[in-house]
Amino acid sequence: MIKDTASRLVVGLGNPGRKYMRTRHNIGFMLIDRLGNHFGISPDQTKFKCLFGQGIYRENRLFLVQPMDFMNRSGPPVFQLARYFNISLDDTLIIHDDVDLDIGRIKIKAKGGHGGHNGIKSIIDAFGSDNFPRIRIGIGRPEPPVDVTDYVLGKFTPEELQNLEPVLKKAEDAVETVLNKGTTVAMNHFNCLIDG
């Protein structure tokens, strides 16, 4: 085990493989790719079914992670990686899609249940706790009769992709705020933003 007391794990949830690229369920992966460019960290290492990169951000070790198991099995790879690098659960920030938030909305939570999200459920089960911060990125809920599963596993429309840029920028800013100022400050700022 590698000991490092000043480390943060930022994990974007999604499904691996080309089939799922740019699908709504993979917006966590999309943000990790963007954060990699922003922080100059390349996710070019693999361990415990995780693709990850690491670097130094404000004198802390920062890991950007994409679990390479399917969404409903995200927890064990993240748990193993966090344990290996000796990173506590409350220093693990999870990013995921949310059908209960409109596209353009993000919401930060300090802890809580899974809300029906299988990736979050898997992480709670693996760690045995829901005491971890997460950033929820809205993808909107489909109108009936569209099936929710088909919707989240479907690709963003060209119009939605065009509208994603400010959403991902806002989520990127939210990650930086959590890292720099803490979850409470980030919640107070970003959870009250109601426009895109």
Image (cartoon, grey):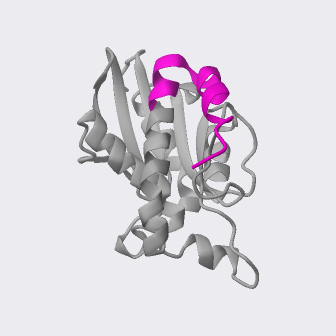
Most extreme residue toward the bottom is 145
User: Quick check: 8 above or below 95?
Assistant: above
**Residue 97 visible from this viewpoint:** yes
**For residue 107, above or below residue 146:** above
Residue 45, quarter of picture:
top left
Q: Quadrant of residue 18?
A: bottom left
Q: Is residue 118 above or below residue 173?
A: below
Q: Quadrant of residue 158?
A: bottom left
- From the top left corner, tell me how far across and down residue 61 is, in percent: 34, 23
Q: Nearer the viewer, residue 151 or 157?
A: 157
Start and end of the magenta stretch? 176-196
- Is residue 8 depicted above or below 108 in this figure? above
- Where residue 124 appears, as percent x and y from the top left, is 66, 43
180 left or right of 105 in image: left
Of residues 150 and 44, which is closer to you in this image?
Answer: 150
Q: In the rendering, at what x and y percent does residue 181 appear?
A: 52, 17
Residue 51 shows in this picture: no
Residue located at (75% from left, 44% from top):
113
Q: Residue at x 62, y 28 (%)?
A: 189
Left or right, 145 with reference to 160: right
Question: Is 49 or 167 nearer to us in this picture?
Answer: 167
Q: Residue at x 63, y 32 (%)?
A: 132
Q: Is residue 137 magenta?
A: no
Query: Is residue 188 part of the magenta span, yes or no?
Result: yes
Question: In the visual, does 110 lie left or right of 77?
Answer: right
Q: Which quarter shows the N terminus?
A: top left
Q: Tell me: 151 left or right of 31.
A: right
How far across and down, in percent of the image, does residue 168 sit? 45, 48
Considering every residue shown, the one lying at the far front of the view is 195
